[in-house]
Amino acid sequence: MRDQHRIPPPARRPPRSRQRTGGFRGVLAAAVVAVVAAVGLAAGCGSAGSGGGSTSMPSSGAGTPGGEPAPLTVDTSSGRLQGMATAQVRQFLGVRYAQAPTGARRWTMPVAPPKPTGPVEATRAGASCAQAGIAPGASATASPSEDCLFLNVTTPATMQRGEKLPVMVWWHGGGFTTGSGSVYDAARLATRGHVMVVTVNYRLGVFGYLSLPGLAGSGDFGLADQILATRWAKQNAEAFGGDPNAITVFGESAGAMSACALLTSPAARGLVNRVAMSSGGACQVRWPRNGLLPDTPAQTPFVSLADGETFGRTRAATLGCTGAGTTAPASVLACLRRTSTGDLLKITSLFSNVLAFGTPLLPKDPARAIADGQNIEVPVLSSGDHDEQRGFVGGVEKLRPTYTAASYPKDLATAFGASAGRVAAQYPLARYPSAAIAWSTVITDASWMCPMLAGNTALARHGSTVYSAEFDDPHAPDVNGIGSPAFDPGAAHATDLPFLFDLAGHDYLRGEAQTALANTMIDYWASFARTGTPSAPAQPAWPRLTGTAGPTLRLAPSRIATVDLAAEHHCDFWQSVGR
């Protein structure tokens, strides 16, 4: 029997007056970047709605259907690409979709490159975008390169003549500051799901999200890159056997937050047919003071352009780029364009969660736009992880134990002010094995899961077809490397990723139960990309989210079934607390 729990509509938030004076601030928070900044890896002519479907073969749930070997030479807008094949997949790696954003093009909107006249080798991934961190599952993705706007295409090695594969365009996570499309090996997803997967690099940190007065594209360069790469996928889909009318953007963490923002962008119309978001909070995720990490302000992933400009000028000043009078903006920008990549990398981690609205790409705050129904109506799959915040708290604890019984009341008071006592009563420390787990649970519920459910129900209430999920493997792979005898990561942020991808070529799944869950998740995601309805052989039907009530599908190795997400995460309580 399905549990139901009525969820109130998202509360209208007062206008934000914050002015960000630093992203990850303080000595401890700066050190945490190396461990958790990348946690969660971190126009066209299609129709709106379900996009008319795809004529591709249905997923067999047992691997790639038979057919002819897919050609390894493909003519695209980026040239005549020469790819490579394995026994399972065909790949085209390091495909340039935009001109290098270097020199005078630093902090300009992305532009498609001219088409090369000769053959283009596409057998090695391009450079990751400039960043100073690491990504889960990868030994290192630190990169000094600004010439990084590349994508990778993976399809099954064999295809039926005349079929069209659904196209899944992956926007990676990483706190808007780290990550790379090439970290995500899509072989399992492409073969079992029988889909075309495109993984994308986009500008990160200061290179992707700087705002300055008078700078065209301020705060949205990374999003513009993601959109141009998706246009490339749509334009070139048929060359790879893909269906340009079955384009699904899917992402995780920062990638999911960007994908949700896309739902509210004028650029989305006619471009995407479906959107899948993992750990994106349906645009509603919000952290209280010190909630994301120690010594961080209250924040959401999105800022007004005015706040972004103030923040950008403040950060520029730390590099000696200042100006006065009417020529100040131009002089600051010129100074920053002369600044070395290495010096800019010193501040790049501060440009997390500063995706700007009040811009041509994002006219309105995505959180408010979703709450008000000002989004394109395409099918949406929106999921979260049962223990999201443990991914961040565990990273802090690994560096230096921070959350204690003594600090718990202070942490609650800092985050929730006059409501701290009510929160402490709802989440008594004695109920949890440690203060770190207690704090993780509070922030998971308040900042991730209940906002996600509110956003999901807002989308459904305003007409979108929504499928809501919770990933809940208590023994999920510890891709963030935060587990210890004193700290159980559980289903932390980013731990769902190994169920869709191998990370940096590594399969992190252990045992038949996790492999079976991964197969089921791929089936659900691939069928969603194919038809707009997630389904999996011999598994429960995934019901639509209806009105302001459930259901949400729980994805766990032990059992896949609907769950009352609001009751599980105390969403009525958080609605009454308000923030």
Image: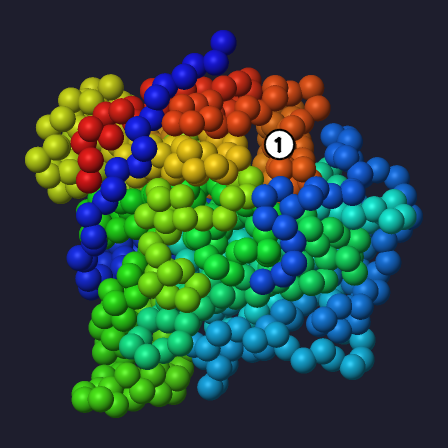
User: How far from the left and from the top, in percent, is residue 321?
Assistant: 27, 83
Image quadrant where residue 557 sits: top right
**SS state under label 1:** loop
Residue reaching furthest top?
1
- Colouring method of the image: rainbow
Quarter the C terminus occupies? top left
Residue under label 1, please give it: 534
**Circle 1: residue type:** Pro
Up-down relation of residue 203 to residue 50 (above or below): below
- Regarding residue 126, the answer to whether it shows in the image is no
The number of discs equals: 1
* Left-right relation of 61 to 219: right
User: How far from the left and from the top, in percent, is residue 411?
Assistant: 16, 39
User: How far from the left and from the top, in percent, is residue 494?
Assistant: 47, 42
> How packed is label 1: few (under 14 Cα within 10 Å), some, or many (20 or more)?
many
* Left-right relation of 69 to 511: right
Residue pictured at 42% horizontal, 27% vertical? 547
Residue pictured at 30% horizontal, 50% vertical? 300
Image quadrant where residue 288 sits: top left
Residue pictured at 24% horizontal, 30% vertical? 575
* Left-right relation of 12 to 243: left
* Left-right relation of 215 to 446: right
Up-down relation of residue 484 to residue 400 (above or below): above
- Regarding residue 279, the answer to whether it shows in the image is yes
Residue pictured at 84% horizontal, 61% vertical? 72
User: How far from the left and from the top, in percent, is residue 341?
Assistant: 42, 78
